[in-house]
Image (cartoon, rainbow, N blue to C red):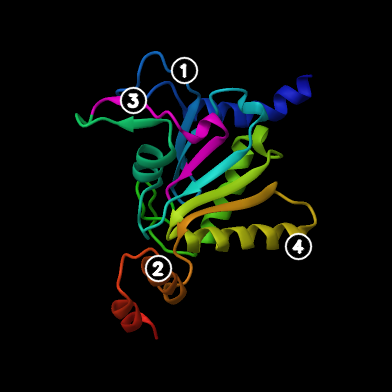
Amino acid sequence: MLLICSAFAYPCQEQCEDRITSLPGQPSYVNLSQYSALLTRALFYWLVESLETPSSKPLVLWLNGGPGCSSIVYGAFEEVGPFQVQPDGKTLTVRRRAWNTEANILFLESPVGVGFSHSKTWHESAEDAYEFLVKWFERFPQYKYRDFFIAGESYAGHYIPQLSQLIVRIDNGTGKPAICFKGSLLGNPVLDVYHDNMGQFEYWWSHGIISDLTYDKLRP
C-alpha cells in the first residue's frame, strides 16, 4: 500500500494544484469537479468531470476550429460545456444538455497562440497536442486506460484527423499504446475546401434555397 501511495503522490499533488473549486459566477448549488492549468509548451486545458460516476465514463478531448477559435470561449461556454454565460457577463447558468452528463470533457486551447495557450516558437499542432496528452495522462493516471475520444467542429476537421492519425501511428509503432484511443467525432468539419463547398451547393439546391439557374452557375 505504501508503494502505491508513493507512486501516485506526485501526480495527485499536481492534480490538487490544478483543482478549481468554483468559477466566478458559478451557481453555489453546482458541485462539479474541474481542473485547469498550462502544460508542456504552455497549452491550456480545462477538465470538467462527469456529473455522475466519472470513474466509469469515457474521456473526450474537445478541439475548436477557426483556425484560432478558443475551445474555452466557444466550445465550453457556447457549445458543449457545463455552463452558459449570461448577458451580464458575470453570471453562469447550467447548460441542460452539457456533454459532461455523458463523459469527462477535456477542453484544450490548441494550437499554440489560441486562447490562454502561448509559445515563443511554432511547431505542428498535432505533435504539440500529442505531447500534451502524454504529459496530461501522467498527471491524471486514473484516465490513462479510459476510453478516449477526440471531438470538435469546423476547422478541427483538420486538427482531429491529424492528431488521430498520429496517435494511431505512434501507438502501433511502440506496440504499447500510451492512449486508449477509440474514435473521433466531427461536427460540420472543414475537411476539403473544394468538396465541402460542392456539397454545400448541392444541399442548397436540393432544399430549394437556390434556383436551378444559380446552381448551374456554381457547378464546375
Q: Residue 180: x, y in percent? A: 70, 46
Q: Is residue 46 visible?
A: yes
Between discs 3 and 1, the one toward the N terminus: 1
Side of 157 where 217 appears, left or right: left
> What residue is shown with label 2?
200
Image marks 2 and 3: residues in contact by CB distance under 8 Å: no
> What residue is shown with label 4?
173
Residue appearing at x 36%, y 66% in the figure:
204
Between discs 2 and 3, the one toward the N terminus: 3
Residue 93, labelled with which disc? 3
Image marks 1 and 2: residues in contact by CB distance under 8 Å: no
Residue type at numbered disc 4 = Gly
Residue appearing at x 53%, y 60% in the figure:
126
Between discs 1 and 2, the one toward the N terminus: 1
Between discs 3 and 4, the one toward the N terminus: 3
Structural distance between the alpha carbons of marks 1 and 2: 43 Å
Residue appearing at x 80%, y 56% in the figure:
175
Q: Is residue 179 visible?
A: no
Residue type at numbered disc 2 = Gln
Q: Residues within 10 Å of mark 1 (few under 14, many from 20)?
A: few
Residue 31, labelled with which disc? 1
Q: Residue 39: x, y in percent? A: 49, 44
Q: Residues within 10 Å of mark 4 (few under 14, many from 20)?
A: few
